[in-house]
Amino acid sequence: MSRIPRPLVTALSSLALAAAGLTVTTGSAHAAGCSQSYLPLPDPVCTPGALNPDVTQDTIDSTICVSGWTSTVRPPSSYTTALKKKQIAAYGYSDTSLSDYEEDHFVPLELGGSPRSEQNLWPEPHYGAETSANKDTVENKLKKAVCAGDVSLADAQNAIMTDWTTALSSLGLS
C-alpha cells in the first residue's frame, strides 16, 4: 500500500481545518476566534453543541431522568477550568476573571449534552440581560418536560441549540 507524503497530508489537513474555521498552532486545532455578537448564545461556529450518544429517547429513564445521573458524567473542574481559560481568550472577553463565567454545557447534561466536548462547552457570562442562571431555569424545565413525556428529547435538544432564550415558548412551555 502506498503512503501519502507527509507534506501533502499536512497541507490537506490544514486546508480542512481552515474550511472548518480552525487554525493549526503548536500542533493542535483551535478556533480562529469566537464572536461575542451572539450573546447570550455561544458563537455557533465555536460552540455548536454536541450530544452524548449514551442518551437517547429510549435511555432517558436510565440516564437523564435518574436523580443525580449528571454527577456521574460531569467532567472535573480541573478540565473545565483549563478549558474556560482557553475559551475566554478565544471569545476575546476583556473581562478575564474566571469567576465571571460559567463553563457551561450548551446542550446541558440534563438533556443529553456531551460532557467533555469542546463543541459543547463555552464560557457563559454571569452578567447581561440573560445569564447562566436564566439558562439553568430553562434547562430544568425542559428536563422536567422530557421526563414527564410532554416533549421529546430531540425536540428539547433542538430548541435549546436553536435559541435557549426562546426554547420554552417554542415548545409551548412556560
Image: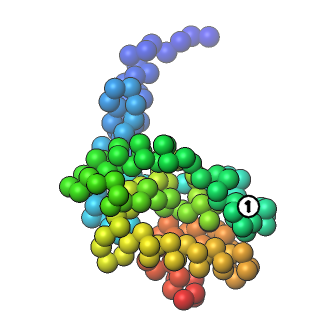
* Quadrant of the frame with the N terminus: top right
Identify the residue at horizontal 54%, vertical 62% (top origin): 107
Residue extending furthest toward the front: 99
Asked where in the image residue 26 lies, by quadrant, the reply is: top left
The residue to which callout 1 is attached is 63
In this rendering, is residue 168 above or below 10?
A: below
**Within 10 angstroms of label 1, few (less than 14), some, or many (20 or more) residues?**
many
Q: What residue type is labelled 1?
A: Thr
Asked where in the image residue 131 lies, by quadrant, the reply is: bottom left
Q: Between residues 84 and 22, which one lies in front from this camera angle? A: 84
Q: Between residues 131 and 107, which one lies in front from this camera angle? A: 131
Q: Residue 83: horizontal and vertical position, in percent? A: 42, 45
Q: Residue 72: horizontal and vertical position, in percent? A: 68, 53
Number of numbered discs visible in the structure rendering: 1
Identify the residue at horizontal 40%, vertical 31% (top origin): 28
Q: Residue 18: horizontal and vertical position, in percent? A: 34, 38
Res. 56 in view: no
- In the rendered view, does 149 fall on the left or right side of 40? right
In this rendering, is residue 172 above or below 2?
A: below
- In the rendered view, does 121 fall on the left or right side of 66? left
Residue extending furthest toward the top: 2
* Quadrant of the frame with the C terminus: bottom right
Identify the residue at horizontal 64%, vertical 56% (top origin): 71
